[in-house]
Amino acid sequence: MTSTETESYGRQVVVITGCSAGGIGHALARAFAAEDCLVVASARSVSSMADLDDENTFFLQELDVRSEESVQHALSNVLERFGRIDILVNNAGVQCVGPVAEVPLSAVQTTFDTNLYGPMRLIQAVVPHMVSRRKGKIVNVGSVTALAPGPWSGVYTASKAALHSLTDSLRLELRPFGIDVITVVPGAIRSNIGNSGMATYNQMPEWKLYKPFEAAMRERIFLSQRPNATPSEVFAKKTVAAVLKKNPPRWFSYGPFSTLLSIMYHLPLFIRDFVFRKLMKC
Ligand SMILES: NC(=O)c1ccc[n+]([C@@H]2O[C@H](COP(=O)([O-])OP(=O)(O)OC[C@H]3O[C@@H](n4cnc5c(N)ncnc54)[C@H](OP(=O)(O)O)[C@@H]3O)[C@@H](O)[C@H]2O)c1
């Protein structure tokens, strides 16, 4: 990107994590760019978002949310380039499917390190900057699954539930400083989440007690990738419209399962368990 801080005046600088092609982050990058934002698209590897290599719109950064050093390096590049960050979108995330009683703790740690501590690393890095300007928006991408945790994805769901909870506290704590905090809650959105989830699942040890549930677990990995999944471009356009509002919503949810799981959130646990046992074969 050739823009300097002066040239970028008036355009919002948006930093997004996890922008590999085919995923929600990539679609968000394009949707923010369509609204004339200066988009810092980041990913673990710049080659995974090579098609965003348009210097007038995107500033590509290598950023691994699990590495403090990587976060600091990428954000200081952004501040050097534009002098500000208006919007941070914590989108990067990984699935983790397997029975809670047997998932290796190393996989639990990786999931939380990416889905919870990753956003925290970015938040703690950008908040002092946003507070100094008394302005900014922080968007944390959660999941509808955290509204009614079912079987086989307990670790992923717990990491997202923790992120929802943390976002609620953060929203109140940052209000005095003029910073908006938004929980974006995707339903079933077309992306690479199934394929990357399967790659992670294939690294899991052989289950001891849960062999008979193997097929149900493999099905769970692709639950969000059925034919009725919302295209990520559609989800991104609606999300960006909500985030760019002068008074953005505290909670924005869209996509298949978002209504169903909101209802399940309110159901007595015995009904919720009954529904899950029928649907998820446990
Ligand atoms: N798709 C859905 O139905 C759905 C539903 C609910 C919530 N979500 C959430 O939406 C967000 C985006 O997911 P998605 O569906 O777009 O899945 P995706 O296509 O698999 O994209 C996930 C992105 O996160 C990146 N990532 C993973 N670990 C990272 C790390 N350590 N540092 C930086 N980036 C990392 C991936 O990069 P690599 O390419 O390098 O792996 C990829 O760019 C996630 O937080 C996910 O939990 C998705």
Image: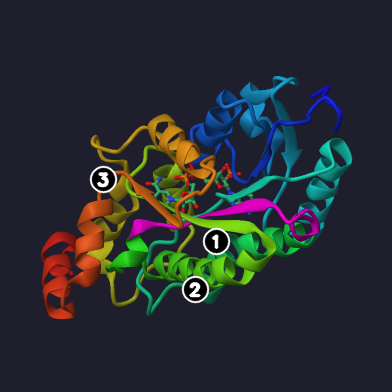
Please say if the residues under marks 1 and 2 sit with CB atoms less than 8 Å apart. no
Amino acid type assigned to the residue bearing label 2 in the image: Pro
**Residue located beneath label 2 in the image:** 104
Dot 2: within a 10 Å radius of its alpha carbon, few (fewer than 14), some, or many (20 or more) residues? few
Of residues 51 and 230, which is closer to you in this image? Answer: 230
Q: Quarter of the image containing the C terminus?
A: bottom left
Q: Is 87 drawn above or below residue 51 in the view shown?
A: below
Q: Which mark is residue 256?
A: 3
Dot 1: within a 10 Å radius of its alpha carbon, few (fewer than 14), some, or many (20 or more) residues? many
C-alpha span from label 1 to label 3: 22 Å
Amino acid type assigned to the residue bearing label 1 in the image: Asn
Q: Residue at x 51, y 49 (%)?
A: 247
Of residues 188 and 238, which is closer to you in this image? Answer: 238
Is residue 280 covered in magenta? no
**Residue located beneath label 1 in the image:** 115
Is residue 130 covered in magenta? yes
Dot 3: within a 10 Å radius of its alpha carbon, few (fewer than 14), some, or many (20 or more) residues? some
Q: Which mark is residue 145?
A: none
Mark 1 vs 2, N-terminal side: 2
> In this orientation, does residue 152 appear?
no
Residue 274 location, x and y as percent?
Answer: 11, 72
Q: Tell me if 4 is positioned left or right of 112 in this view.
A: right
